[in-house]
Image: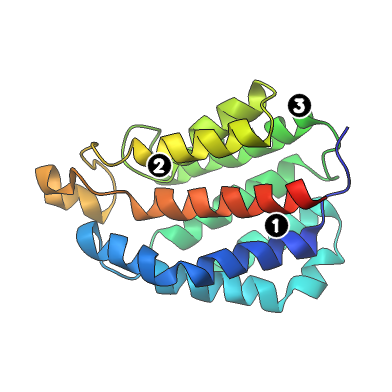
Amino acid sequence: MMGELPIRRLIEACAATVAAHAEELTALDQAIGDGDHGLNMQRGFKAVAEAAEEIAALPFGKALHKAGMTLVMKVGGASGPLYGSLFMAMGKAGHEAPTEPARLAEVFAAGVEAVKARGKSDAGAKTMLDVLVPVQAALAEGGDIAAVRAAADGGLAATAPLRATKGRAAFLGERSIGHLDPGARSSALLVHAVCDVLEEE
């Protein structure tokens, strides 16, 4: 059994980690993108954090949907629609907060499938899915928090040798090899932030 998910603390933790790593995300995006991932993510999660009290008062599914809508409205570039799709699809799949790991895996899987559809991509294309798909697999296998963290870190590290085939980085071709994907990095940061909160519960 899992405890009740503390929505407000999860929002605050995610916003804090994005703010703390905004410069790093910007630097990663300057290498293979247009350099705005850090600021865009910071702006989006700041807006979610400012609405944290309102969001946390909603039922689980509606809370995730509102968080996703806020990200779509506030995060520029491709990241807004992709992260928005992740949260909104999870909200649609999980009207009530999951209390079992297997149910959490199902809800997360719905979000990952939405990101795949929105980005017309999958793991291996040097995107956030290189983190999200391994994390989904770890959850589906009943992995504990350590396994989820390891999946996120392994997926992120695996983006460095990949040649980008999606997004602005794809225009660089071979020059995209050797760089971590900024979207994968922000995804890994968010996974760790969620794990930190759940460990404290």
Residue shown at the point (87%, 66%) measured from the top left? 57
Q: Position of residue 84 (x, y in %)?
A: 56, 57
Tell me: residue 43, above or below residue 194: below
Pointer 2 local density, CA inside 10 Å: few below 14, some 14–19, many at least 20: many
Label 2, secondary structure: give it: helix
Observer-side mark, 2 or 3, equals: 2
Name the amino acid, label 2: Leu
Q: In front: 176, or 20?
A: 20
Q: Which mark is residue 184?
A: none
Q: Which residue sits furthest bottom? A: 50
Residue 102: mark = 3
Q: Earlier in the sequence, mark 2 or mark 3?
A: 3
Measured Cα–Cα span from mark 3 to mark 1: 21 Å
Residue 107 in percent (x, y) is at 70, 37
Can see residue 130? no
Mark 2, residue position: 156
> Is residue 64 found left or right of 127 in the rendered image?
right
Answer with mark 3 or mark 1, whichever residue precedes in sequence: 1
Residue 31 shown left or right of residue 65 in the figure: left
> Picture quarter containing residue 15?
bottom right
Cα–Cα gap, marks 1 and 2: 26 Å
The first of marks 1 and 2 along the sequence is 1
Q: Quadrant of the N terminus?
A: top right
Residue, x 57% and y 54% (percent of image)? Answer: 190
User: Can residue 192 be seen at all in this image of the molecule?
Assistant: yes
172 over 144 or under it: above or below: below
Q: Secondary structure at mark 3?
A: helix
Q: Is residue 188 left or right of residue 194?
A: left
